Amino acid sequence: MNSLNAWQITLLVLFPLFMMYSFLGSGDQFLLGAIICACLITGCFCSFVLNKPEINVLFFLIALAFTDRQAPFLSYTFYLINFVIAITFIHYLSNNFTDRKYFWFFPFWVCSYHALILIIHPYSVPVAWLIYYATDLAIFLLCVLIKWDAKKIMYIVIPHLIYLMCYGFLEKLVLNPIRVGGPTTHATNYAIILTFLWTIWFVWAYLRKIPISLLTFVTFLVIFLVFLSGTRMGLIGIMIGLFGAVGTKIWINNLHKSLAKKITYALSIFFTIIILIAVAWQLLPQNIFLIKAWNVLLTGNLDPSSIGRLLGWASAIESFTKHPILGIGPGNFDIAFTEFISKHLPFYDTHSMPMLKHAHSTGFNVLAEYGLSGVIMLLTVIVICWLQLINFIWDNPQNPLGYSLFFGGIVIFCLPMIDMIPSQGLDCWFYGILASLGFHKNILSNPKNELNIKSVS
């Protein structure tokens, strides 16, 4: 264990006291505040004392999920959590400083865009918005610096998945809501996070030949929780995970065969999964909320949720056509949506379909609020990260880690395109791992290394 500097010891002693003092006036919400404090304190201890920054990232993700509740008493925890994340990043960067241009390109590229917005000033820029993206950038850069391997990734994925599963079942048993919402209280967000983490674990575990009984048991629990959340996109995430695991297994076993044969095998597995799901669908009770929601779409009709999404997307497109370069500004979608409804649907029923605060699509929301400049800025980072993953899979075609990240990436990229990013920091952690594959070129360069890692299941 490395010795601590004086300022680190002072921080470890005084900062937890400051955090607990901040929550003394929370009243009924003291328990939730205490949980967030416990996450931050434990994460700081793991990072500063045990030199385990990846564990700190796990606790950051857990703490940030609660801030999506937007409860009044949580307003100051937004700044508290961001302050801890900033301190952690600065501390780790100071001990692992690098002058590589690959690393410094990301903060230069992102900060240049934000500086341009502040200079041109096409709209008012909220301070909270700057802090929000500074926090995301800090998590991303911290994850780039960390040298990830399968063991470190699973030390985040598996505990986080177990935590979300326990949270969902406890919420159903104690509160018995119509739809389980998880830490964020939003059912769709909960299902996306759950299936995202499950996909990474399931593909990796299946390729590592983890006992089929464990795979079946965990998968059954996740599917059950998806049904409790009543989220249609959760089933799409399950399908991606199943196809990813089985299809990748066939792909690896047939690497010596032609590309056409490998694609044929993969497509046959895909359609087999579709047929099995369709058969199982008919055997399930038709009065379940999720099944009724899907049946509405299958009959060609639109429910309030689908109508709200279509209206949000139409409003985002209209906003983009008016401000194509710089957008309408962060957090201004609700204003644009109100004007869109007043103009095109003056008799819109706000009781059955309330006004939207975002476009229910990450892509459309970025397009509307940030314009082409923001889209180019984000797409550049995303493309660079995906290229690192593709290069890693190309160099290590038999390594399960690359495929698990690939199909997990499909879930976290595609599903928010018809909703939103489910929780702050989750995408930054994932893309930070992908960027780290390029930063640490020698990470698991030998596929045999993967086979020597003991299972953490």
Image: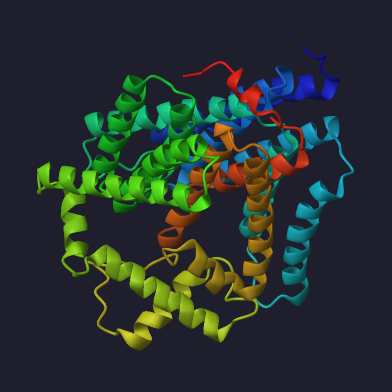
Is residue 26 something that shows in the picture? no
For this orientation, the residue located farthest to the front is: 257
- Give coordinates of residue 49: x percent, y percent: 72, 18
Q: Give left or right: position of 167 versus 175.
A: right
Which of the pair 327/236 is nearer the observer? Answer: 236
Q: Is residue 412 above or below residue 149?
A: below
Kindly give the residue lying farthest to the top in the view shown. Answer: 1
Q: Residue at x 68, y 61 (%)?
A: 380
Give above or below for 95 relative to 85: above
Which residue is nearer to you in this view: 145 or 95? Answer: 145
Does residue 441 appear in the picture of this structure?
Answer: yes
Residue furthest to the right: 99
Residue 222 pos. (x, y %)? 32, 34
Q: Is residue 327 left or right of residue 67?
A: right
99 or 8: nearer the viewer: 99
The spot of residue 269 in percent (x, y) is 35, 45
Classify 62 as above or below 257. Answer: above
Locate residue 354 relative to residue 147 in the image: left or right: left
Q: Is residue 54 above or below residue 456?
A: below
Q: Residue at x 28, y 44 (%)?
A: 229
Determine which quarter of the picture holds residue 418: bottom left
370 or 263, which is in the foreground?
Answer: 263
Q: Residue 440, located in which quarter of the rendered image?
A: top right
